[in-house]
Image (cartoon, grey):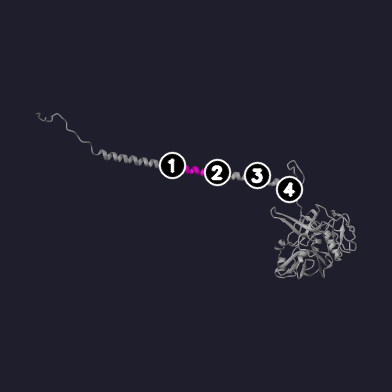
Amino acid sequence: MSMPQSPSPSAEPRRGKPWWLIPAGLVVALVFLALGAWLGWALLAHKLDGLEGRASLIDEARTREEIALQKKANEALEKRIAEAKKILEGDVCTVDNPFGGLPAPPESTAPPAEAVPTPEGGRAFEGNLLDLVEGAVVLVLSPRAEGVGMGSGFFVAPGFVVTNAHVVAGAGDIFVTSKPLGGARTATLVASTNATDPGEVDFALLKVDGVPATIQPLAVTTTLAKLDHVVAAGFPGIVMAGDQSFRRLIVQGDASAVPEMAVTSGEVSVMQDLDGGVPVVVHTAGISRGNSGGPLVDRCGRVVGVNTFQMVDASQAVRVNYALASAKLIAFLKSQNVGVTVLSGRCVPANPPTEAAAPAQGVSGGQGASGGQGGGAATPATPSK
């Protein structure tokens, strides 16, 4: 049996680890961690500041670029507008514009001061075409149960006014007004074709008493060709809606209030015969409701037709204007023994005039008109047979 050995007197006793190292290491680690966090946040803030500044610079540059592009677009558009205006002002074919330009618009929308012939025994009319038309054209009003009918008319002989039959159809009282008449006057229905549908012979004859002698009736002609210049005169409702005098006349019953007559100009497109052999003039002088019964005249002030109806194609937004040709009007007036002046011969206004228009013999003793002051002389007309 072995006995336990006693410790050797030369062996060194063991020492324990220093206890303060652990807290010291934790403190150092926390310090470095805090320092790293501060440095990281500082770097991140610096980068964010740089990005914000950079974004601001990018937006500003883009804005400048867009402004520059818009300026270039505006300059290009202005250049195209200028080129378009130049083309519209031209009337000939050029290398730059091989298809030619549109005709230059007239300097004035008012009809020129051409003259019209004076029939034998008649008196010269001193004025221009517009004066002649404004003196002869009247507003026709026909009160009905459903409201006031409205159209246009014109003097064809002293005291006699022509309009459309559909304008006065079913009317009890009939009134006409114009500035030369001095206000509204009662008119009497003398004769009517009783037509109410488009394409029929649509005429009515009115008698007006006490007409001033200064009112010059319009002469009539059957001489007409395509592209002849024509003028439509009357009282279209769409224009009258803005006329204060018309409102006083209709709403307040002020008989002295006279609206302004409206005129439009255009050209003859074609002459046609409708079903039943009714001759019409298709033209481009603008008309609308209220123009019915008003005259279509040439540059010499001669009636070539009576504006009566329109054909509208809504799918193509097209309006075609129709006037009943003067041949039927002449036959209607002669059937009523009305002394209308019928003139023939081409209307060829000359400007400036070299001499006064030669007299032309009228039919049935009616009165025409002759240009005096302020206009060129028209080619003398020959009386029709």
* Residue contact at pointers 1 and 2, CB within 8 angstroms: no
| Marks 3,4: beta carbons within 8 A | no
Mark 1 and mark 3: span between their CA atoms? 46 Å
Q: Which residue lies under the disc numbered 1?
A: 46
Q: Nearer the viewer, mark 4 or mark 2?
A: 4
Q: Which residues are magenta?
A: 50-63
The image shows residue 382, relative to residue 212, as above or below, that is above
95 w.r.t. 273: above or below: above
Q: Is residue 321 visible?
A: yes
Give whichever of 101, 287 is nearer the camera.
Answer: 287
Reading the image, the residue beneath label 4 is 88
- Closer to the eye: label 1 or 3: 3
Q: Where, by quadrant of the figure, is residue 76 drawn?
A: top right
- Mark 2: amino acid: Arg
- For disc 1, the neighbor class at 10 Å (few under 14, some 14 to 19, many from 20) is few
Q: Which mark is residue 62?
A: 2
Nearer to me, 360 or 26? 360
Residue at image coords 42%, 42%: 44
Residue at image mark 3:
76
Residue 183 in view here? no
Q: Secondary structure at mark 3?
A: helix
Magenta part, dominant SS: helix
